[in-house]
Image (cartoon, helix red, strand yellow):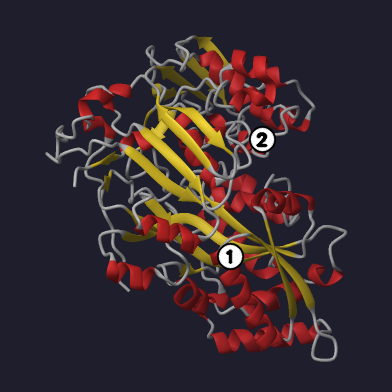
Amino acid sequence: MTLKTKLMATTAAFLIAAGGAVYADGHATHPETGEALASDQTFTYRVGDESPSYDPGLVEDVDGADVVRDLFEGLMNQDAAGNLIPGVATGYEVSEDNLTYTFTLRDNAKWSNGDPVTAGDFVYAWKRAADPALGSPYAWYIELMSIENASAVIAGDMDPSELAVTAVDDTTLEVRLAQPLPYFPQMVTHGTTFPVHQATVEEHGSDWVLPENMVSNGAYVLTEFVPQERLVRERNPMYWDNDNTIIEKVVKLVVSDENVALTRYLAGEMDRTIVPAGQFPSLSQQYPEQAVSVPRACSYYYMFNLRDAAPDELKNADVRKALSLALDRDIIVEAVLAGGQKPAYTFTHWATAGFETPDIPMASMTQADRNAMAQELLAGAGYGSDNPLSIDLVYNTNESHKAVAIAVSQMWKQTLGVETTLANQEWQTFLEARNNGDFDVARGGWCADYNEASTFLDLMQSESGYNDSKYVNAEVDALLAEAKTSNNPQANYDKVEEFIAKDTPIIPIYHYASVYMYAEDLEGWPYENFEQNWYSKDLYKIAE
């Protein structure tokens, strides 16, 4: 299989400095490449389900984060390679003890209603996200940032006003950390840290995110939203860098069926859609300039319910390990998915910056040896042909998830005699079920919030907001805490991955590749950005 990598032709910094009318005749050319720009600068793409929220303080899914990055802008952005570049902040300084970060905000950043974006807007947003009253599913992220008093605020033991983030003046934001955190600047590209307009939030409550109410500070404004159908955002004339934006309108379409979406893409209705499971080899031959697969900072896994009320059989580590061993990951990535994904025996993605994949014994075994060990472990736990193990496996509605679940259930049946009941759920229902512990085994997918191994492994911390297994291991907690202040945390990460392999609270299955179809006239996609964080303001369409 040949994986095609397209490189971004240029960055937003080089885009032509002119308003939208310049592009209307289709004769404008790109100043660096000389490419003629299309007269219609509309980018249309597909997602599989509606996101739970587009409030920066509440957004929790990847598709929702993509929208939020267009509507709002944080302190820092990422370029096409994933490097930090200025956003609302032009830069920052760090104190000698690495505990105080001082961000300088640009003085020409504005909200879509013309109000200036100030340091106070960030203070309000961060305290709001940490406040238990909001109930943010990402409140724990503020704690991960090591901001002073974050833990106590999130726990409700301290007032949100005590969170150590201060507006020194309108263009100076000071953040005090409880301990040094080398990758702290990377964390402020995440939507949870984006500012929100206080007056709008307080006036409209939860309805502030509706198109008729929303005030935002990103390159685009929300102009239309039909849940489970479409979401439209259009250029924000108040955005400080609007002159260097080319894409006029971004349309997100919700199409649950991947094959239907592909048909609509091939008919020219979309500029980007996912490649259905197993179809990348043929599509890359038919459409070599459109089918793309590149590594993506996400890991696909199954999680076990380890709560007190969970089935007793799942509380047995030997049972969980047997189920992990019996999965032939090579078949899943090569035959079921066939899009450049890689088998996973660690939770942390193999391509994560600074991470060296530890030697997990299971990874070097043959599948025959894994199966033999799985059978021995399950028999030792009291399960076999006369006492078969039964499992309920839930996943969110998606053809690829369904294909993987069917393959997994067949492997468990063939190797271990396990009876698996499969159930798919709509996205929001699925998230609630996982959070509430209404499952035996559930699909999980984690995409990095920043490019460092802790973004994966912190989910194994006992109090993590996304530790949906409710895995508790004091040694793992201590290793993760120590890693945050370590100059070389690799040894700690190795040990945590070893605990995951031994205790098996989750089953890592594969490491993602970003496998999509992209229209040939779409340029500027950040294929080299490992997190695949994209900004519509950096895209453009060329004339045919």
The x, y position of residue 464, in whole percent, is 69, 46
Determine whether, in the image, residue 481 is placed left or right of residue 111. Answer: right
Tell me the amino acid under the disc marked 2. Ala
How far from the left and from the top, in percent, is residue 367?
55, 85
Name the residue tied to disc 1.
401
Q: Quadrant of residue 110?
A: top left
Q: Are marks 1 and 2 in contact (CB under 8 Å)?
A: no
Looking at the image, tell me whether mark 1 or mark 2 is earlier in sequence order: 2
Mark count: 2
| Residue at the outermost front position | 267
The front one of 354 and 12 is: 12
Task: Locate residue 312: give its quadrant.
Answer: bottom right
Number of the label disc, if any, that sits on residue 139: 2
**Which residue in the rendered view is the most extreme toward the top?**
169
Residue 206 percent location from the top left of the image: 68, 26
**Quadrant position of the N terminus in the picture:** bottom left
| Residue displayed at 39% across by 37% down | 535
Residue shown at 80%/80% (left/top)?
389
User: Helix, strand, or loop for circle 2?
Assistant: helix
Q: Residues within 10 Å of mark 1 (few under 14, many from 20)?
A: some
Q: Residue at x 32, y 36 (%)?
A: 538
Q: Nearer the viewer, residue 410 or 454?
A: 410
Q: Quadrant of residue 288?
A: bottom left
Left or right: where does residue 523 sit relative to residue 275?
A: left
Closer to the eye: label 1 or 2: 1
The one of 499 and 116 positioned closer to us in this rendering:
116
Relative horizontal placement of residue 104, taking residue 4 as reference (left or right): right
Q: Which mark is residue 391?
A: none
Q: Position of residue 190 (x, y in %)?
A: 51, 36
